[in-house]
Image (tube, helix red, strand yellow):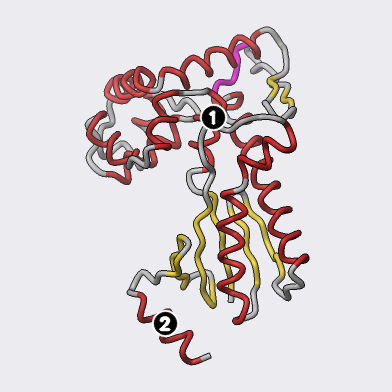
Amino acid sequence: MYVKIDAAQLEWRTAVWLSNDQVGIGEINSGEDIHENNKGTFGLPTRLISKIYLFRTIFRGSGWAFAHDNSFSPVSADPEFWDDINRKFYNKYHGLDEWHQQLSRTVASRLPIVSPLGREWMIPHNKDGSIPWTVFTNHPVQGTGADLMSIARISLMRRMRTLGMRSLMVSTVHDDIKVDAPDDEVDQVAELAVKVFEDIPKNVYKLWGVELPIPFPGEVKVGRVLLDMYDDNKQLVCPDGMDKYENWKRKQ
């Protein structure tokens, strides 16, 4: 069986942490449905559009870019419409906006961006001398998120080895980890994976002395193939009902 572990909202949570955005921190820690909230706050038509918009705006998408994007142009093809949404977004998440402005000054001064975990990025200017907003807002988030995934990956591998498990970590891509597990180890791998992500704040503090203000949970799915996975969040649950998964277990 495949056990697939996805870091929940990795990019957004990383951006909220790095920017110390108090609104974002509050929403995450209170368990609010951020996408549904923003759908109403910004007057977007669906939760899905709100979700996609959030992750695009982490990297400073412009009104022009949204207006010419097939995912957003059906909502409005007017750049001014999206510029107004952007203003509302950065007014709400002003900590994120202030962090972006700070990054812009760092890049303009030709100094490296340094993450709390010590990774550095030297961002070159564009050929016309301007600074690449979508690049320097992207690198710290993606790079630091990758560091957190490395912690989870190594921790999971060590725990499986300590327990003498036969399961094999077969792939890691961006924000997910895939494990090929014997049928009798599926539940154990799933439980370990959830715990590994719960322990990320503790391990970051242990390694760097940095306190994370928010959790970085993992979401687990299980299935024979990647196109037919069972959702899991501490308890294995099939999208079509628990009976499908339980029927599979009874046959083993």
The number of numbered badges drawn on the structure is: 2
Residue at the far bottom: name it: 251
Q: Amino acid at mark 1?
A: Trp
The residue lying toward the viewer, choosing from 199 and 157, is 199
Q: Taking 208 as reference, is 215 left or right?
A: left
Which SS class for mark 1?
A: helix
The magenta stretch spans residue 178: no
Q: Amino acid at mark 2?
A: Glu
Task: Provide the residue designation for mark 1.
Answer: 17
The magenta stretch spans residue 132: yes
The magenta region covers: 129-133
Q: Is residue 183 above or below residue 43?
A: below
Please state the horizontal and vertical placement of residue 166, each as a whole percent of the image.
73, 76
Please state the horizontal and vertical placement of residue 5, each as a whole percent of the image.
56, 59
Please state the horizontal and vertical placement of residue 90, each as a whole percent of the image.
39, 20
Indicate the quadrant containing the N terminus: top left, top right, bottom left or bottom right. bottom right
Q: Residues within 10 Å of mark 2 (few under 14, many from 20)?
A: few
**In terms of secondary structure, what is the magenta stretch mainly?**
loop
Task: Provide the residue designation for mark 2.
Answer: 246
Please state the horizontal and vertical placement of residue 174, each as a whole percent of the image.
61, 49
**In the drawing, what numbered circle is on residue 243?**
none
